[in-house]
Image (tube, grey):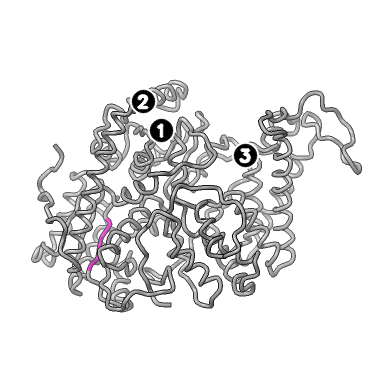
Amino acid sequence: MEPCAMEPCAMEPCAMEARALVAWLEGEEELDLDAWRHRIVCGRRPAVPFGRRTDLTDQLEMLAEGFVGECALVWLHAALNVALRRGVQSDRNTRRFLALWQEHADLLLELLDARWLISACDSFADVHPDPDQAALAASASFLVNTVKLYETERQGAPGAAPAPPFPAAVSFRELFDGLTTFLPERGDMVANLVVRLEAATARALRRPGPFPVVAALLRELVNRLLGQGSVFQRARPLARFPWPAALAPLPPLPPPVAPCGSPRPLFIAAPSADAPGWLLLHDGSRLARGFHLGRLASGQALADGLARRGLVARGWVNEASALEAQLAAAPGPVRLLVLDAAGLRSDGERCRALRQVCLQARRSGVATAVIQAGALWDDWEPFERAFLSHGALADAPERLVPLQVEDPALLLFEELFASFEPPGLDRLPLAVVDSPDPGLASSLQRFAGEAAAPLRTMTAAALDRLRRHVPMASTPAAAWPRLLRAADLPRASLWLGDRSSALLAALCAEAAIAVPPGATAAALALVQRYGLEDRALLPADWGPGDPAATQALLADRAAAWDAATRDRLRQRRRQARAAIEVMLDSLAHLAGVSPPASPINMPPLTEDPRP
């Protein structure tokens, strides 16, 4: 299949994407799974999909409503499950389903909720070529669905309070067919069950050969049952023979390896071969071991904005060795290389390597632009000097455009959260996102555990580090580290942390933010740009040592975000959106695609633009 451009995000379940999925499910051509992995599903406010549509396209559009704000790969996974249930090209889609899990289990295990993990087990039970694996998958589905059935019955009549767990009046007696009641204060049934599951799945995971996806699925589902408010969690404090609060987490799973810059398609229809294109240099989402919500949103917003201006995304480059191959493989002219310099510093091998890629692009006649989104100019100046110190760039400075703007991810987050309400869940008072600094990340993790607050991070590498730092069995279920998802952001009234892209997304979701002392320059710059020093910056004596006092302080800070504050922040975000649109116009102009809607008017590099 030939490369093609992504349509601009229309902020409703994308009919083009649904049609592309149906064409893929019913056809022989292949989609680029890695491209779907690095895409966010856009749409109207999310809803819990319910019911069955006769038309497959309608069914997939309905399912998309349940994945608004999520990684598009989980929607593709749902589409495969639907196709297998309906017998659509069963052999071909079975191979696709098995390959999807072998290549992308690292992400699917993190991002799929229990409903879709069970659906995956059902599909493995139906189509797995190994009958032992199919039986294990059916057993996992039976276990979780049994708990679902029990928890549904326990809810009782509509409006009635659930029965208390294991009331003292329950005595030892027969239930049916020789089964007797389980008494937590006397029995070891659950403890033995968990030990056996741990041992059996651990043996499977140590076995050589392909990754044992079904065993990993079972472990993940058991951990969800043990820590998510089910009968297992309610009974554990009463048990004489306690069972672990969780099985040990899986070792880090390697992300799939895609050829750097491989411009394979999202859709079947390709753009005109002579359409001008651009390349992204330093793709933060792919460099973050396969997933980073902030950089993913930034790259998607950049691609959508340039597509609206007639410039087609032709792929990405993360190393110098890939540039020539990318330029040769592109089906149309590549006019522009955009370096996303977020998080880079001027002193380091990575900066020098990227400078060589820029010089190589210039020698090939490709204009180069550098975006340093949302960072302090103090960080930018030495970085830019390092680029301009080479004569090939200094000879033609108009071909290198340094653009200092808000993170382009703002465009996507603003549209996404305009009507975003997580279905059926109350807003939490507090959630925590970690820090790139390991010491501060440790303090934030400790506080989240003491406050039983959700803890999120932005990268798979940070997730591995946080999970190694504190055992799962000693961590409240709510505070077990997970990757940040867009759906998390509106669910908390205040976000505490030190990830600038997460804090920006929280502002777009109308949440308050708080930044601890010692935060990164990017987080502090965000606070300064939005004039939130008095509301967002925490005092030096904050900390996990006195979680009650810190929680009270954060509650006071959240209460201080009154209507006037929110109105002022909306106005500031509107200004930032306008600046990003000017930047996109400038990039299109630099690529010779269209005249800029507004003149390129960036402050000199030696001038500090802050008031």
10 Å neighbourhood of mark 2: few (<14), some, or many (≥20)? some
- Type of amino acid under label 2: Arg
Q: In the orientation shown, which residue stands out farthest toward the front?
A: 54
Location of mark 2 (residue): 557
Q: Secondary structure at mark 3?
A: helix
Secondary structure mostly taken by the magenta-highlighted segment of the chain: strand
Q: Could you tell me which secondary element the residue under label 2 belongs to?
A: helix
Residue furthest left in the image: 395
Secondary element under disc 1, as helix, strand or loop, is strand
How far apart are the alpha carbons under marks 2 and 3? 30 Å
Tell me the quadrant of the picture where the N terminus can be found.
bottom left
Inspect the image, locate mark 1, and give the three-letter code of the amino acid beneath it.
Leu
Question: For the residues marked 2 and 1, what is the alpha-carbon distance in whole angstroms?
Answer: 9 Å
Is 169 in front, or is 570? 570
Residue named by callout 1: 494
Name the residue nearer the viewer: 260 or 139. 139
The C terminus lies in quadrant:
top left
Q: Position of residue 74 (x, y in %)?
A: 52, 57
Give the Cα separation between the discs numbered 1 and 3: 24 Å
Determine which of the numbered discs, if any, sits on residue 227 in the image. 3
| Mark with earlier residue (1, 3) | 3
| Magenta-drawn segment | 336-340
